[in-house]
Amino acid sequence: MQTQSASILVVGIGNLLAADDGVGVRVAEKLIERNRCMGACVMDGATDGLALLEPVRAARELIVIDAMDLGDVPPGTVERLEPREILKAQSQKLSVHGIDFADMLRIVQAEQGALPHLIIFGIQPESVVPYTYGITPRVEAVIDDVVEMVETEVHSLVQQGGKTS
């Protein structure tokens, strides 16, 4: 985990033992390996939403990478979502695994009166079969693209001084 600044937090969430559900974790691992998100803390958030409460409370900017049901789109589709899209989806489960990330965000908002600026990179899974290790080829093929998208997003936030519009 990079700890230069907690003001920008990048979290990959998912379950590595449920096929494509682990894509967020794989992206986080690659971000940590490449070490190009200077000015941000990059975390493997796995599947424990409660463990994310403290780091999210401390963040001003939050970037999340997760496998998500994006609707009728092909596996490997990547969408960049901001709060207005996320708030529209609050009645739906945002993540394909057991964690209810939206509930964790509601806890932070209730406690602090506001959320960090939030961007989610949602990736359409092909398979989330439990006890299946490994990302499917169509989802694996977009990991490097998502890594670059996140690096670009972090660089832009750092250049803005961590200030959101």
Image: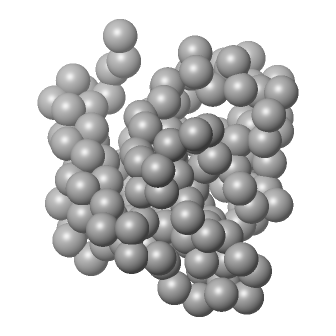
Q: Is 58 placed left or right of 105 in the picture?
A: left
Tell me if I can see residue 104 in this picture: no
Which one is nearer the viewer's eye here, 104 or 149?
Answer: 149
Residue 15, image quadrant:
bottom right
Residue 34 quadrant: bottom left
Residue 25 lies, with reference to residue 41, above or below; the image says below
**Percent position of residue 23, x then y:** 49, 67
Q: How many marks?
A: 0
Q: Is residue 45 above or below residue 7?
A: below
Quadrant occupied by the N terminus: bottom left
Q: Position of residue 122 (x, y in %)?
A: 50, 45
Structure colour scheme? one colour
Q: Is residue 127 visible?
A: yes
In-image side of 20 versus 149 (left or right): right
Q: Residue furthest top?
A: 165
At 39% from the left and 76% from the top, the residue drawn is: 137
Judge by depth and name the residue closer to the eye, 2 or 119: 119
Tell me if 56 is positioned left or right of 148 in this view: right
Figure check: 144 above or below 115: below
Location of residue 131 in the rendering, given as x and y in whole percent from the top left corner: 73, 88
What residue appears at the point 43 percent right and 38 percent down from the top-left corner? Answer: 79
Q: Quadrant of the C terminus?
A: top left
Q: Position of residue 123 (x, y in %)?
A: 48, 51
Q: Residue at x 24, y 56 (%)?
A: 145
Q: Nearer the viewer, residue 100 or 71?
A: 71
Q: Residue at x 55, y 60 (%)?
A: 125
